[in-house]
């Protein structure tokens, strides 16, 4: 468990599910709005549903992944991060080159708490978990321009950039990183 003032980071529990699902709805809607895609409610709902399935799988004892961490501020869920096998977008963008590398994903912070270090604290805690698991690399991807700007600052140049991945003038980026660089 990590404490940063009143911030706590712990594995996802059954008690967190409703708050986490609301966080996904709010954060994904905001991300789409910020990208100028707020007019695509079906796409937003599809993304939220994908995250819901991941959360449910993480709490099912038959599955070993995804692994979810939840950030809480004064007991309220304000952020999430997950780790699982590479997703379809990374597989597609890299021609399956990173299939054996796990993916950092589902890093969402409620809009009003963004820019306060919660995402960095979640990444740091996930890196500690990956080290304990004996993992030395991870990958992540993003098609959101706003997130790409942050990831370029934090993770450097991407492993691969795919132009027009989501349509004309869209760019999708995939990073391959060493766990030791973010300890």
Image: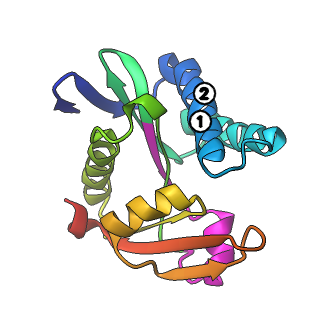
**Could you tell which of marks 1 and 2 lies nearer the N-terminus?**
2
Frontmost of labels 1 and 2 is 2
Residue 145 x, y percent position in the rendering: 55, 61
Please determine whether, in this image, residue 142 is positioned above or below residue 68: below
Residue carrying label 2: 21
Is residue 76 or residue 143 the one in the foreground?
143
Q: Quadrant of residue 142?
A: bottom right
Is residue 153 or residue 58 the one in the foreground?
153
- What residue do we see at 68% from left, 70% from top? 170
- What residue do we see at 69% from left, 76% from top? 92
Name the residue at the right extreme. 42
Quarter of the figure that contains the C terminus: bottom left
User: Callout 1: helix, strand or loop?
Assistant: helix
Res 55 label: 1
* Mark 1 vs 2: CB contact within 8 A: yes
Quarter of the figure that contains the N terminus: top left
Residue 22 x, y percent position in the rendering: 59, 24
Q: Is 57 colored magenta in this rendering?
A: no
Residue 19 x, y percent position in the rendering: 53, 20
Q: Which residues are magenta?
A: 80-99
User: Callout 2: helix, strand or loop?
Assistant: helix
- What residue do we see at 34% from left, 15% from top? 75
How many C-alpha atoms fall within 10 Å of the one at disc 1: few (<14), some, or many (≥20)? many
Left or right: residue 144 versus residue 139 is right
Using the rendered image of the protein, determine whether residue 135 is visible from the camera's viewpoint. no
Q: Quadrant of residue 152?
A: bottom left
């Amino acid at each position: 468990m990590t404490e940063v003032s009143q911030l706590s980071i712990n594995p996802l529990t059954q008690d967190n599910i409703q708050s986490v699902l609301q966080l996904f709805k709010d954060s994904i809607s905001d991300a789409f709005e910020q990208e100028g895609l707020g007019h695509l409610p079906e796409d937003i709902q599809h993304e939220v549903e994908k995250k819901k399935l991941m959360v449910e799988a993480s709490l099912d004892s038959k599955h070993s992944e995804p692994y979810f961490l939840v950030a809480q501020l004064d007991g309220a869920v304000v952020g999430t991060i997950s780790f699982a096998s590479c997703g379809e977008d990374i597989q597609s963008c890299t021609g399956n080159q990173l299939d054996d590398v796990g993916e950092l994903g589902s890093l969402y912070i409620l809009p009003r708490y963004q820019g306060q270090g919660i995402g960095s604290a979640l990444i740091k805690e996930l890196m500690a978990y990956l080290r304990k698991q004996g993992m030395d690399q991870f990958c992540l991807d993003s098609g959101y321009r706003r997130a790409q700007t942050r990831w370029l600052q934090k993770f450097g140049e991407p492993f691969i950039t795919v132009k027009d991945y989501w349509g004309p003038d869209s760019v999708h980026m995939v990073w391959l990183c060493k766990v030791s660089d973010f300890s």
